[in-house]
Image (cartoon, rainbow, N blue to C red):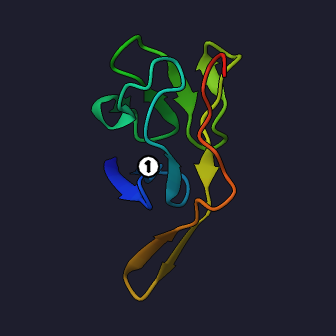
Amino acid sequence: MVAYEVDGQPIVLVYPRDGGLVAIQGFCPHQQSSLAEGDFDGHRVLTCSAHVWQFDVTTGKGINPQDCELARYPVKIEHDEIYVDIVGIAPKRVGV
């Protein structure tokens, strides 16, 4: 799991053992804590370090609580370069 910024937007890249590279918004929708400081189980569950909210990185859906989600961004790998397309995809926030 590693944090990057794309056009000023924080994102996190994760590589689930059972799937391909995933790009998600870099902050928790709850209180905008950095998800890069959280814990990724290597399979699909990303846990925010601030309040232990959990997300399925393969879908972006909340696990705990279930009524939240993360924005996911298309990823392309070409010639050892990673491209993340954030155009038109706004980060998710709770209560906004």
Residue 48 in percent (x, y) is at: 40, 23
Q: Is residue 51 left or right of residue 67?
A: left
Q: Is residue 65 left or right of residue 52?
A: right
Tell me which residue sits at (60%, 35%) in the image: 70
Tell me which residue sits at (33%, 28%) in the image: 38
Residue 41 in percent (x, y) is at: 40, 33
Residue 36 in percent (x, y) is at: 33, 38
Q: Is residue 43 above or below residue 81?
A: above
Q: Is residue 20 above or below residue 30?
A: below
Q: Is residue 52 above or below residue 7?
A: above
Crowd tier of the residue under label 1, counting other residues whose Cα lies within 10 Å: few below 14, some 14–19, many 20 or above: many
Q: Secondary structure at mark 1?
A: strand
Task: Find disc 1 in the rendering and name its residue.
Answer: 11
Nearest the eye: 96 or 30: 96
| Amino acid bearing label 1 | Ile
Residue 58 in percent (x, y) is at: 61, 44
Which residue sits furthest bottom?
79
Q: How many marks?
A: 1
Q: Is residue 26 above or below residue 21?
A: above
Nearest the eye: 35 or 59: 35
Quadrant including the C terminus: top right
Tell me which residue sits at (56%, 40%) in the image: 57
Q: Is residue 53 left or right of residue 2?
A: right
